[in-house]
């Protein structure tokens, strides 16, 4: 059974940090690329970052470059999103998603095969 489970969300003050985890089961990260998406109230789902299955290449949307870092631990079959210097505009539900094969950028959400249930990130003072 394929499953993605996110954790690590919460409430943080502006300038703070959080680390999200995406634990995968039922498939191997050796063969699937993982993307992080977010959706704020009233807005469309936005691709934030992804890491490719083949060589671990990483990609970021412009608004998070230099602040967010995606990484993976294949032994634990888990992908992480380290989020630093968080701002109120980062507030959203964050989802991880899996796509078979390598990627060369943050593909549209439609290309991803499996999704987690999401974890809420709120940045507020």
Image (cartoon, helix red, strand yellow):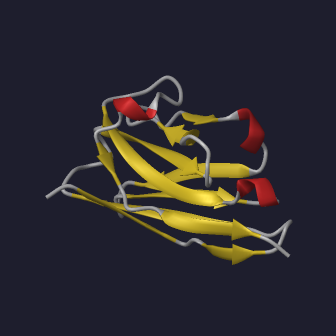
Q: Residue placed at 61% from the left, 44% from the top?
A: 43
Vertical side of 18 occupied by 80: above or below? above
- Seen from the viewer's position, the closer of residues 93 and 104 is 93
Q: Position of residue 36 (x, y in %)?
A: 51, 47
Residue 96 falls left or right of residue 25: right
Q: Position of residue 76 (x, y in %)?
A: 36, 64
The quarter of the picture where residue 24 lies is bottom left
Q: Residue placed at 53% from the left, 33% from the top?
A: 57
Vertical side of 125 occupied by 104: above or below? above
- Seen from the viewer's position, the closer of residues 24 and 56 is 24
**Tally of numbered discs:** 0
> Which residue lies most toward the top here?
104
Q: Residue placed at 55% from the left, 72% from the top?
A: 8
Q: Position of residue 86 (x, y in %)?
A: 78, 60
The quarter of the picture where residue 75 lies is bottom left
Residue 19 falls left or right of residue 89: left
Which quadrant, please, contains the C terminus?
A: bottom right
> Which residue lies most toward the left here?
1
Which quadrant, please, contains the N terminus?
A: bottom left
- Seen from the viewer's position, the closer of residues 71 and 114 is 114
Q: Is residue 65 visible?
A: no
> Which residue lies most toward the front here?
42
- Seen from the viewer's position, the closer of residues 39 and 85 is 39
Q: Is residue 50 visible?
A: yes
Q: Position of residue 48 (x, y in %)?
A: 60, 42
Q: Residue placed at 56% from the left, 67% from the top?
A: 120
Residue 7 falls left or right of residue 29: right
Vertical side of 58 occupied by 9: above or below? below
The quarter of the picture where residue 102 lies is top left
């Amino acid at each position: 059974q394929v499953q993605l489970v996110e954790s690590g969300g919460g409430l943080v003050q502006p300038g703070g940090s959080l680390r999200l985890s995406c634990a995968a089961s039922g498939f191997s990260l050796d063969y699937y690329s993982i993307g992080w998406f977010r959706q704020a109230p009233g807005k469309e789902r936005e691709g934030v970052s992804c890491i490719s299955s083949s060589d671990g290449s990483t990609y970021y949307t412009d608004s998070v470059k230099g602040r967010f870092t995606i990484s993976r631990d294949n032994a634990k079959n888990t992908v992480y999103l380290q989020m630093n210097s968080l701002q109120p505009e980062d507030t959203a539900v964050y989802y991880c998603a899996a796509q078979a094969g390598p990627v060369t950028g943050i593909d549209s959400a439609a290309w991803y095969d499996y999704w987690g249930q999401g974890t809420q990130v709120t940045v507020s003072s």
